[in-house]
Amino acid sequence: MPNGESNATEALTSIAVPPHPRLLSVLGDIEFQPWQCIAELVDNAFDDFLRDSDRSQDEEPPTVWVTLPGRTSTPRDGEVWVKDNGRGMTLTQLTDALRAGWTSNDRYGHLGLFGVGFNIATARLGQVAVVRTARLEDPVWQVVTIDLREVASGNDFRLPVTTELKASAGEHGTEVVIRELKPEHHETLSRQQTRIKNILGDVYASLLTERDFRLVVDGEAVKPRRACVWDESRYVVRNREQIPAVIHIDERLADRVACLTCGAWQDVADENRCSTCHSTNLRVEERRIRGWVGIQRYLHTKDYGIDFIRNGRKILLRDVSIFSWVDPDDPGSRGEPEYPMEVPAGAGRIVGEIHVDHVRVNYQKNAFEYDTPDWKRVVRTLRGDGPLLPKRARELNYPTNTSPLARLVAGFRRNDPGLNYLIPGDGKGPLHEKARQWADRFRKDDPKYQSDQEWYEAARLHDNPPPAPEPDPTPEEDILGSKGLLPPPPPSGAPGASTPTPTIPPETEDDRRARWRAAGTQLPDLEGKFGLRGQGAALEIKAWLVHGHPISRPNETDRVPVYVGPGRGSEAEVFIDGDHPVFTEFALDTRDLVVMELADYLRTRNRLTRSLSAIVHALKEECLPDHRIAGPFITENATRLLARVRELMTPVIAGNSSGYWSLVAPEDQAATQRRFALEGGSDSWEDLLETGEWIDYAPGSALVRVLAARPEGFLDGRVFRPSHQALTDPEARKASAERIVDLVSDVAVLADRPVRRGPEELQRGRLSCRIIEQELARPTEET
């Protein structure tokens, strides 16, 4: 984010950001893909990094963290966070940054070219945007909230400003939080995280590779997309000319005076004002076309073409329009496609990366201004003036085209296997699919596929296949051959032989139990004697917790959570379906349900007339004395209450699961994973991190830390009733949050560490539980 002179922190309660407030609503209708909106905010951070020449080498690398809404979130709860560790802004600079149409960036040398970029990005994604910024020397964070619904209904563009105390003096940077996402974009942001991550790794590959910038999405560092091309030493020969697989380009054009305000190039270098906008912000700019074009190691119908890069960000990805020739003498020409033209149809392998920092782009940053002389010069540099294909060039009286693309087309236009065209083969035909599979291994950093040796060897062996070995005779063939006898009829399973259909016997009760035991884990605390005095022999129980195998009664298909299977004499086996919804969705206590099933079994076996609940109590009293809760029920009550808090927090956490997970302390993250592992969750850990359901396994201390770090996400009736956002005094906001945090901390201590405590501590815990229960949001307040 922009930074300038060191200003004292302004004590304002609102800022005016003209023009008319309804402009933001209009900007939200401008066509931007969700990933483009994210990229606009990343651009602003990267621009600040590019300007920060004084950044210490000892500091954390320049990093942007992006977290996207969880896949189980709703549009109302979903949030997008974009945070950087840049220099931060003063309130004056923040005011300018939020003003539609304003920009601190020159039109050359920066990624963020248009001041409306921030406004479009935030208004396009959601209804509410919160910007939090602070410099290293500032004592507080400046916070501005933009609510489009309130802004659009107002008569002036005044945004509320609040401050938040820093958690530590060394904090600095800028964070943008976008809330109440629009449904049409929430679906993409919450379901296509991997795709968005890959696009960003492609768009910013140059900056991530050539500079020490880091981009982290949902806790995972974005990998720059690398081109999988043949080594520069590889070449083919056409008409006695060696055509390399990679051709480098570096054409320096004459420097020229440019207007940094509107971007117009100046025809007269000694003028002091821009001939277009009359700005005096002029500067001599370098004009240079640099990069490379080359041959990919695999063919693809979509994954080929030239990447055009401006200031480190890709504007065009895999552009194929450069492969069409437009006749300048034909005003209606739509272009003649010249590559690819070979079998398989539409599959190409010419790629490249061309940097053109001096060519202007449109406001969406997905196209250049194609009618400018600068872009037309780029096209001529890459593909020349005439057609790429020699025959077509001769027909139109153009000289031989020696441009980089024309040379590559001449050398590699055909897709015949072998070294003549550098196409992997197997002696019979091309290995296009195998070559693409190897490229996937290349991008997964498999060491074997980083060089082009695997592709090269396949092309070489196609030209020079090794002789096929003679098959070894079978022992039967040796014996029969030595005696001169005819071979026997084809064995069973050979072509022409009949193959009987095997009969699968039905699974017996013993087979079912053996399968469950093999997949189960014994539960020692539920094993032993279960019986009632004077009511026959006690049952000798062995218990198994089973995952991955649904449990059912004999000759029935309905799934049951617990099954008691009789054994020999007084023996019995208990099988518990650990994946049954009654446990995974309702959190029913496993031991209670087992005791209930045993009570029903004994009541049936002994023909008892006592109620089922009375038998359950008697079994617990006589057979499970160690299951009693020592002392008052305070620990159980705290645990139950904390579960309710988790339940209410889950939709908020799901709104940006990765972001909230990053707020959890490392020791609590480890404890959460251990609990998940011990409880044998049926979902994968990666799924929990995406959906936010990791909160179910987090210790109470983790909940406390998340509440303290993001109180605005959980107060104001979302989880807890007290107000927070409406309070303008930072100390009042802090006090409101700390009150709830302290109460939840008391409950968490009781739930996480149920040790013997004195009466005063128990009384405090009991009161904290009661107060928290009263402060929980009512159903009508919950989001």
Image (tube, grey):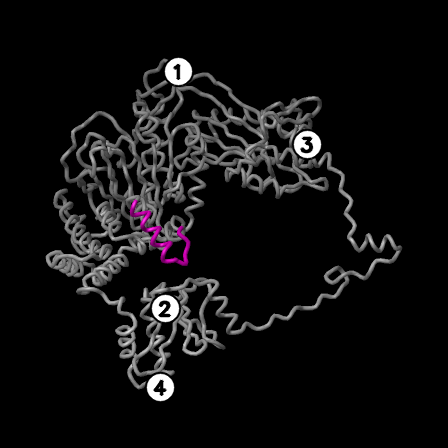
For residue 675, what is the image quadrant? bottom left
Residue at 70% of width from left, 37% of height from top?
462
Relative height, residue 259 to residue 365 (above, below) = above
Q: Residues within 10 Å of mark 1 (few under 14, many from 20)?
A: few
Which residue is disc 1 drawn over? 268
Disc on the earlier residue, 1 or 3: 1
**Circle 4 or circle 3, nearest the eye:** 4
Q: Residues within 10 Å of mark 3 (few under 14, many from 20)?
A: many
Say whether residue 169 is left or right of residue 667: left
Say whether residue 553 is left or right of residue 332: left
Which residue is disc 3 drawn over? 419
Disc on the earlier residue, 2 or 1: 1
**Residue 322 drawn at (x, y percent):** 55, 32
Relative height, residue 167 to residue 244 (above, below) = below
Instruction: Tell me the quarter of the image containing the C terminus.
Output: bottom left
Instruction: Tell me the quarter of the image containing the N terminus.
Output: top left
- Circle 2: residue type: Glu
Magenta range is: 667-685
- Circle 3: residue type: Leu
Disc on the earlier residue, 3 or 2: 3
Q: Main secondary structure of the magenta part?
A: helix
Which residue is disc 2 drawn over? 527
- Circle 1: residue type: Val
- Circle 4: residue type: Arg
